[in-house]
Image: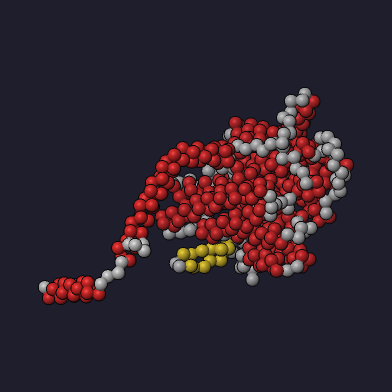
Amino acid sequence: MTDLPPFLLFYAAAIGAAILPHKARGLIMLLVPIAGAFAVLQLPDGLSVQLTLMSITLEPLRVDQLSRLFGILFHIGAFIGIVFSLHSKDRSQHVAALLYAGSALGAVFAGDLLTLFLFWEMLALTSVFLIFARRTERAYGAGIRYLVIQVISGVLLLAGALMIYHQSGSLSFGHIGLNGAASVLIFIAFGIKCAFPLLHNWLTDAYPEATPTGTVFLSAFTTKVAVYALARSFAGTEILVYIGATMTCFPIFYAVIENDLRRVLAYSMINQIGFMVVGIGLGTALAMNGAIAHAFNDVIFKGLLMMSMGAVLHMTGRMNGSDLGGLYKSMPITTTLCIVGAASISAFPLFSGFVSKSMVMVAVLEEGHPVVWLMLLFASAGVFHHAGIKIPFFAFFAHDSGIRTTEPPLNMLVAMGIAAILCVAIGVYPWVLYDLLPFEMEYSPFDGSHIIAQIQLLVFSAAAFAWLKVANIYPPELHSTNIDIEWLYRRLAPKWIRSIVETMKPAQESLSQVRQKAGKGMMRWILHHYGPEGTLARAWPTGSMVLWVAILLGASLILYYA
C-alpha cells in the first residue's frame, strides 16, 4: 500500500465528510493528516508509479526529497487548518478544505505535466468554495474573479504541456527552463499562481474575502504549490532573481496604506514569496535550500498570523485596523500568539523566519547581486514594519475601540498554539528542518554578524514606525478598498464596456427599427398568402385541381421518357 498517491486519503476523507455527522466528520478530518504524514514518511526515495492512458505515460506518484518535504509541509498545514476549523459546522467548507489539501498533495507528487495540470485545476475549483462560503456579495465577486484567473493559469499550463509533448513526445515534469514558447507559457502559468508582479491581484482580492477558517487553508497551499513547481522546473533561471526582488518590495507600499488587516497579510504573503523566488532564481544549493526552508516556515508563521486575524474576525466581526484596538484586554492569549507570528515573519533571531530568510540573503551576496541584496534588506525592514508591527499594533494595541469580547473557541487557540510552538522550535533548533532539505550544505544561522545585522535592521525599522506615528505622518487607516493592477478589469474595463454600449445605442436603435419594418413586411406577406383571405386559403374547383394533376403527371412522363 506504500505506492498509493497521498492525495487519495484526503479525497476519501472528503467523501466521508460529505455524509458523516459533525462529530464523526471532525474526527476523520483530524486523523487524515496524521495518517497521511506517516504514510509519506514511509515512501521510499525514488519511488515512481506509472500508468499508460491512450499511449500516454503518466506518473501520478514520484517521490524524492523535494516532493517529500512539501508533502510533509502540506500535511502540517492541513492539520493546523483543520484544528482551527473544528468549531465550524459548515460541511461545504470541510469538504472543500479536504479536497483542496489533497489536490495540493497530488500536485507536488505528480511526475508528469498532465497530472500536474489536473491537480492544478482542482486547486482552483476546490479552493474557490472557501471564498464563496463567506456568503457575501463581495466574496462572491472576488471568488468569480479568482476562479477565472486560476483557470487561465491552468489553460496556459495545459497549452505549454501539449506543445512540449508534441516536440519531445514526453510529459515528464522536471527541469524545463526558459527555452521556447512552450516553456514561456508554463512559466507564466506558474507565475500567476505564484503571484508575480502584475499577476498578483487575485491573491489580495480573494484571500481577504474568504471565511476566517478558509483563509488559513488558502495561505498554505496554492502559492506554495507554485513555489514547488518553480523549484522543480525553473531553478537557476536568472530572471526569477529580479522578479522575486520586485515581489519583495512593491507590496510594502500597499500594505502600509491598507486598512483591512487580512489584506495587509495578503500583501505580506507576496513579499515573502519574493524571497523564495529569488532563491530559486539563483539556483545554488544554499539559495534553493533557503527558498524551500522559507516556504516551509511561511506556511506556519503566515498561517499563525492569518489564524490570529481570523480569530479576531470571528469574535468581533471586524477586520479594519481603524475599527479595532484594545483587544489585548479581552484576548490576551490571541495577542501573545499573534506576536509570536509577527516575530517569526520579521525574522527575529530564535524565530523561524530568521533561520531561512538569512540563507537567501547570504546566497544573494555570494552570487554577486549587491543591488538585489539591498532590495531584500529594504523588504526585510518593510515586512517588520507592516506585518511585524502594524498587524498586532492596530488589532490589539493602537487605541481602545471599546470592543469587549472573549478568547476564540478552544480549537482555534490550540491551532494557533501548535503553530507558535513550531515557529519557536524551528527558530531555536533549525537543524531538524535543514536535514529535510534537498541539497547538502554547511550553514550556521547563528553567526554573530547575522544576528547583529538583523537586530540593527529591526531596531531601525521599529524606530521609523514610532517616528511616523509620533509625527502624525503615518498613513491613516481609511474605510476604503485599495486596488492596484486589478483596476484594469474592475474599473477601466467596465468603463470601456459602458462607453462602447452607449456609443452603439444609436446604431442598435436603427437596427431595431429595420428589424421591426422587415418583420412587419414579412407578416403582411404571410397573411396575404396564408391568412384567412389569402391566396392559398381560397376554395379551388375540383375541375381545376384535376387539370393541374393531369398537367403535372404529363410533365413527369415526358421527363421520364426523354
Query: How is the protein colored in the picture?
Result: secondary structure
Q: Residue at x 48, y 41 (%)?
A: 501
Q: Residue at x 71, y 43 (%)?
A: 262
On the rendered image, what quadrant is the N terminus found in? bottom right
Q: Is residue 535 left or right of residue 12?
A: left
Q: Position of residue 241 (x, y in %)?
A: 57, 39
Q: Position of residue 427 (x, y in %)?
A: 76, 45
Q: Residue at x 78, y 49 (%)?
A: 314
Asked if residue 309 shows in the view, the reply is yes
Q: Position of residue 229 (x, y in %)?
A: 57, 51
Q: Position of residue 240 (x, y in %)?
A: 55, 41
Q: Is residue 508 left or right of residue 72?
A: left
Asked if residue 362 shows in the view, the reply is no
- The quadrant holding residue 76 is bottom right
Q: Is residue 6 left or right of residue 347?
A: left
Q: Residue at x 50, y 51 (%)?
A: 156
Return the residue nearer the eye: 203 or 422: 203
On the rendered image, what quadrant is the C terminus found in? bottom left
Q: Image height check: is 141 above or below 36?
A: above
Q: Image height check: is 280 above or below 97?
A: above
